[in-house]
Image (cartoon, grey):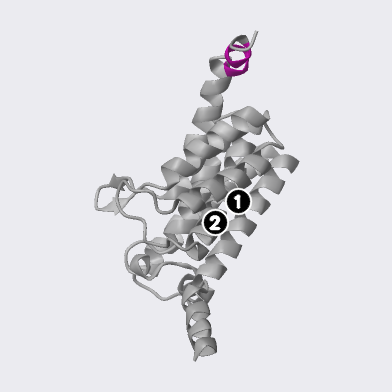
């Protein structure tokens, strides 16, 4: 009886195949964009812009026509609520968030912001899912403190490869803090894939502008 209960509990807490596919796709897409940006920044911006334009066109067509391969991929990776509303929304907003980061910020800040989005967001979800206090993300309430802290830790590590560690720590924490809330935009919530990199990049930019390190050092001397 005990073993049966353990199996039921394990099955209940397991991440669904759909969610797992989305996490893998999320990480792989971000990693590829980061590699491209390191190789050729200008080319990467052009490719991302082209991907957004083509993606929007395909999304509009998909609202009326089930394009064979495209529809298969949407069924595998897109949330069901967007299939008849905005097919491909998640991927398009992810690409848009990366493109805006590359356009608005210096290369290193942009890379750190994309790294936070790529690794922090999915890791936060995984830890939240498997922690004991699991619950859905309501409006203006932390989805899970363990997930937020785990996402912050991972984001801090990966973004530290591009910026000074204290900037990485502050930006990671604030970005994951914002990711823990739902911000309504019209009839839908503002997509995390767009919000997280812009928040992270803005925080890093402001910290550099106000000479945060010098101000922090002056407190100890």
Q: Is residue 94 visible?
A: yes
What residue did someone put label 2 on? 122
Q: Is residue 52 visible?
A: no
Q: Nearer the viewer, residue 54 or 178?
A: 178
What residue did someone put label 1 on? 119
Q: Is residue 133 magenta?
A: no
Q: Where, by quadrant of the figure, is residue 24 drawn?
A: bottom right
Q: Nearer the viewer, residue 180 or 21?
A: 180
Is 190 placed left or right of 28 in the picture? left
Residue 70 placed where, x, y %? Answer: 50, 71
Instruction: Please determine whether, in this image, residue 82 is positioned above or below residue 174.
Output: below
Please tell me whether mark 1 sits on a helix, a strand or a loop.
helix
Q: Which residues are magenta?
A: 212-217
At x 49%, y 46%, the residue is 96
Is 200 placed left or right of 213 in the picture? left
Is 203 placed left or right of 119 in the picture? left
């Amino acid at each position: 009886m005990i073993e049966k209960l353990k199996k039921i509990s394990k099955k209940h807490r397991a991440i669904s195949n759909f969610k797992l596919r989305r996490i893998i796709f999320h990480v792989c897409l971000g990693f590829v964009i980061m590699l491209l940006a390191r190789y050729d920044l200008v080319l990467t911006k052009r490719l991302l812009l082209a991907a957004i334009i083509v993606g929007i066109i395909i999304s509009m067509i998909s609202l009326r026509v089930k394009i064979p391969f495209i529809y298969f991929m949407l069924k595998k990776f897109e949330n069901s609520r967007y299939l008849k509303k905005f097919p491909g929304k998640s991927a398009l907003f992810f690409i848009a968030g990366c493109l805006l980061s590359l356009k608005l910020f210096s290369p290193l800040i942009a890379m750190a912001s994309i790294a936070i989005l790529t690794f922090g967001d999915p890791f936060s979800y995984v830890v939240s899912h498997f922690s004991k206090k699991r619950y859905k993300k309501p409006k203006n309430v932390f989805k899970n403190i363990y997930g937020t802290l785990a996402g912050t830790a991972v984001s801090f590590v990966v973004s530290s490869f591009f910026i000074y560690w204290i900037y990485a720590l502050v930006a990671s924490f604030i970005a994951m803090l914002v990711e823990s809330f739902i911000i309504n935009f019209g009839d839908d919530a503002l997509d995390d894939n767009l919000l997280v990199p812009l928040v992270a990049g803005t925080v890093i930019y402001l910290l550099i502008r106000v000479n945060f390190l010098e101000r922090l050092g002056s407190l100890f001397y």
